[in-house]
Amino acid sequence: MDLGARAGLDPQGWPVAGELPVITEASEAALLFERIVDNIARVVQGNDEAIRLSVTCLVAGGHLLVEDVPGVGKTSLGKALSASVSCRHRRIQFTSDLLPSDVTGVSVFDATKTTFEFRPGPIFANIVLGDEINRTPPKTQSALLESMEERQVTVDGNTYKLPDPFMVIATQKPDRARGTFPLPISQLDRFLLRIQIGYPASSPRLSCSRPIA
């Protein structure tokens, strides 16, 4: 992934329009990496290790699996990461009745043209947050396999390329939770990293409460 051409950040670290030259020096890449981390840390506080691992996963072209309890900032992490590198972000809430076509998209018949028209699903984004992926049956989970491995989606015999960069940040409840479908090994292999965020320490929690108070 050409991160230097996509992560348009102003001097304060916020995303701006336009593209930057391709980064060729390691020092420049390290500086840009730190600026992205600092930018995400403005939103997700007290979880520096999780932020660094998520940015590393994006740069490496991999996918991230976050296993943790609700309320620790999993969704906020995905949104902040996509905003920091000027990428399109989509969120999929996995439920027991979600169909594969709800993820990849579906062909709809156009009566005026008497042809089928493909309507892309939420998988067509740069950073896709799959929330509680183990709450949906294996049939729907498998809809992610091709997209995560080959960066493409096949619907009705037609293949559609996914945007570049493409990253899936999937969250799941602990395996002991009721009403879950454990991910198969074939799908776990698609993830580069598997992390836990956890609750922040007392100091970051106090700093978050001060603006509200």
Image (cartoon, helix red, strand yellow):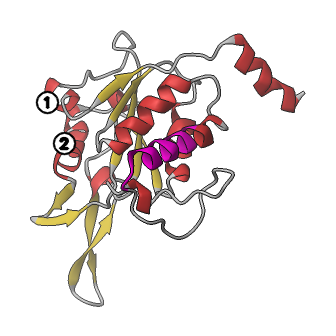
Viewer-proximal residue, 195 or 180? 195
Q: Tell me where residue 121 sits by quadrant.
A: bottom left
Residue 139, image x and y in percent?
19, 38
Q: Secondary structure at mark 1?
A: helix
| Residue 205, visible in the rendered structure | yes
Q: Which quadrant does the C terminus fall into?
A: top right
Residue plotted at (63% across, 22% down) = 46
Q: Which residue is mark 2?
A: 145
Magenta span contains residue 34 = yes
Q: Are marks 2 and 1 in contact (CB under 8 Å)?
A: yes
Identify the residue under disc 1: 186
Q: Which mark is residue 71?
A: none
Identify the amino acid type marked 2.
Leu
Q: Residues within 10 Å of mark 1 (few under 14, many from 20)?
A: few
In the image, the segment drawn in magenta is 24-37
In the rendered image, the vertical position of residue 3 relative to residue 71, given as above or below: below
Q: Which x, y percent locates residue 20?
A: 48, 65
On the image, the x and y values in percent for residue 202 come to 72, 11
Dot placed on the residue nearer the N-terminal end, 2 or 1? 2
Determine whether, in the image, residue 118 is placed left or right of residue 72: left
